[in-house]
Each structure stands twice: as C-alpha cells, then as structure tokens.
Amino acid sequence: MNEPTYRIASIPGDGIGVEVLPQGEIVLRAAAERYGFTLRFDRFEFASCDYYLAHGRMLPEDWKEQIGAHDALFFGAVGWPQTVPDHVSLWGSLVQFRREFDQYVSLRPVKLMPGVDAPLKTARDIDFVIVRENTEGEYSQVGGRMFSGTEREIVTQETVMTRVGVDRILRYAFELATRRGTPHVTSATKSNGISITMPYWDERAAAMAAEHPDVAFDKFHIDNLAAQFVLRPDHFDVVVASNLFGDILSDLGPALSGTIGIAPSANINPERRFPSLFEPVHGSAPDIAGKGIANPVGQIWAASMLLDHLGERDAAAAVLRAVEEVLADPAVRTPDLGGTATTETCGRAIADAVR
Ligand code: NAI
Ligand code: MG
C-alpha cells in the first residue's frame, strides 16, 4: 500500500518564528517516519517583514495559487515593529489567510502541562478547547462615523450574525465534543444585555443541542463565564463563543495553564475547501529573537493539531505525549520555564521521544 503524502506549506515569518518552525518540522518528520506517511514541506519566505522591505507588500500577488492547494499551512509568527508597523504586517499576511481561506474556526486547546507553573490554585485537571467564531459577529465592517469632530459625532458598529455563520461554528463545537470523547459543550452568551443577537445565538445553540442529545450542554453569560474559568477550570470540555467573546476567552484560557511559549492555535476551514493554518499563539518575540532560546513547544503542539486535522490521529497523540514527557524533564526546559535548554535541544528531545 502506498503511504499517504501530505504537502505542507511552511511559512516561518519573523523573529523567533524562524527559530521555532524548523523544530516543528523535525517533530513532524519524526511522526511521519514512525507512523508511516510522507510529508513534503515547501518553504515560503513571504508573510515576513523582510519580504515586505524587499517587495513593498507582505504577500505576492499569486499567493493563493502558491499555497492554496497544500494540505495545511504551518506558520511561525509575523511581526517586526522596528521596520514594519504591526497592523501592516499582521493584516497583510495572517488576516488574509484567515479571511480568504474561510478559516472560520479558531481553535485553542487549554491544557495543564507537566513542568508548567500554573498561576491558579484552582488549577488541577484543566483540559478543554475554545472554539471561536472567526469571520463575523462583533468584528464586522458594518457601521461608520458621522459628523466627525463635532458635538454631533455619531459612531456605530453593528454585530453581524448569520444563520450560516452561527450554525456552522456551533455544529463544529458539538462534533468536536463528540470526537474528543468528552461530550460536553458550553456556550458563551450575553443575552441578558445584548438583547437581539445574543438571544439569536442562544436559540441556534439550543437547536444544535437538540440535534446532539448525547452531548451535555450548558451556557453562561460571558462575565460569569470568565469568572468560572478561574474558579473551576476543570468544568469545561468544549467552549464555543462568538468572535469577540472567543477572542477574550482565547487569551484567558491559555493564561490559566501557564506560559505563552507553549500555547498552540489552529485556524480551520472544516470543509477543506481551503488549507487550514496551524501556529503557536505567541508572536515573533523580538526581545529574545536570534538567541536560540525560544520555547518551541507552542509550534510543536500546533504540529500535533496539524496532524490531527490531516486525520493522522495516532501521530497527533504521540506528539502531544512526547511534549508532556519532555516538559516533565527539567533538563530540556527552555528559560521561560526556568530551564537552560536551547530551542534546538528541546525540539530534538521531543522528536526523539516521538521516535
Ligand atoms: P510575543 O508573543 O511575541 O512576546 C510576548 C512575550 O512573550 C515576550 O517577552 C517574549 O519574549 C515572550 N515569548 C513569546 N513567545 C515565546 C517563546 N516561544 N518562548 C519564550 N518566550 C516567548 O508578543 P509581542 O511582544 O506583543 O509581539 C511581538 C511581535 O509579534 C509584534 O510584531 C506582534 O504584532 C507580533 N505578533 C504576532 C502574532 C502572530 O504571528 N500570530 C501573535 C502575537 C503577536
Ligand atoms: Mg487576542
């Protein structure tokens, strides 16, 4: 039988993205060897500030043709504010990928890892996923400003919820809960205060819950939900939220479980009409770039999510196990976790553990 072959577009970007991405590739190669599939990496230098300085834009005109047929995008981090303003570098690259490839699910796992000092006393058995709607909701372009700079100044921005947009994110959350084997979905709402769109969100969530009788369902107002994240993080399995609420929870969740250096994120187009994107949560970290001490775990955990998306579930689980094993060993922790290991030492140890 022929081994399946996957084509991965590797896009390192800037700063520590260039340092951690190769470690993710090494671990992916180890997983491919061990689990019997082939990965072909194509490296792209666009979506970086160096590319911008040379070409006056973050992406080439034909970027969609160049990476649109790959099975996944493996991304480092973008941004070098000393040379290119952050809104230019981010909007010119990552935001384009997310929008143009209709990556409407933003996925962030929250899991307490060994060797990581969690900031909470309540942190025990934290292991859940945040599913954020990534294309509409509060982050709309409907609105405007009138009578600027006068006493009559008017500013509006409308929340846009579509049935298609709300249903597809809710469906993804319920199906993910079923797949994880922890069938429990929590919905973030605020229907007591936001009295038109949020009751609609609740209505669609209730309908989706009725279609999935095997999945336990509850909902919290966003203010209380933020408090519950802190008070009893072990209550949650899959948390689904609109764009704004999901954005906030996506930072709060991983903060509960430790350092930004290990948190991964995925931007997914579940229908696979376009490639999905896997990346660490952190940015390019100019303060430590070039020193070889960046923690590669966020990138490597993102690699595990990439494998899961490709359907290589065993390989994905093996990478996550290897991360847990290695984090438990103080000798291979990077400085952000109180160790002295380099990016490469840590990455190599995880690749070895996968093999
Ligand atoms: P950042 O995440 O790059 O850094 C924040 C702090 O965390 C820094 O002190 C950094 O040293 C530390 N840190 C981050 N990743 C680490 C790792 N893997 N190991 C050890 N320490 C780590 O966020 P910041 O400083 O706000 O932004 C820097 C640049 O990155 C900006 O240009 C920003 O626009 C960009 N950025 C890009 C993102 C992306 O590509 N998805 C996300 C966030 C920021
Ligand atoms: Mg955010």
Image (spheres, grey):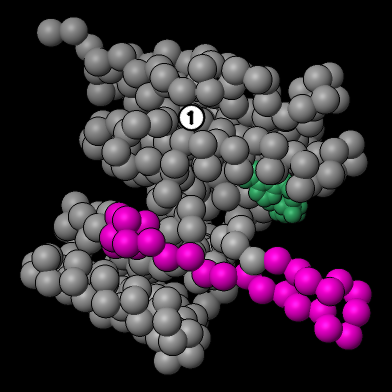
Based on the picture, tell me whether residue 182 belongs to the magenta stretch.
Answer: no
Indicate the quadrant where residue 332 lies: top right
Q: Where 240 sits versus 135, above or below?
A: below
Q: Is residue 23 visible?
A: yes
In the image, is 84 to the left or to the right of 216?
right
Q: Is residue 254 left or right of residue 186?
A: right
- Please tell me which residue lies in front, 347 or 282: 282
Q: Quadrant of residue 128?
A: bottom left
Instruction: Verify whether residue 158 appears in magenta.
Output: yes
Query: In the current view of this chain or complex, which residue is farthest to the bottom?
Result: 192
Which residue is under mark 1? 73
Q: Magenta span covers which residues?
A: 144-170
- Where does residue 227 sit, x and y in percent of width and height? 48, 86
Q: Is residue 152 above or below residue 9?
A: below
Look at the picture and state if 67 lies above or below 80.
Answer: above
Q: Is the CB atom of the residue marked by disc 1 within 8 angstroms of ligand 1's nearest atom?
A: no
The residue at the point 48 percent across, 53 percent down is: 135
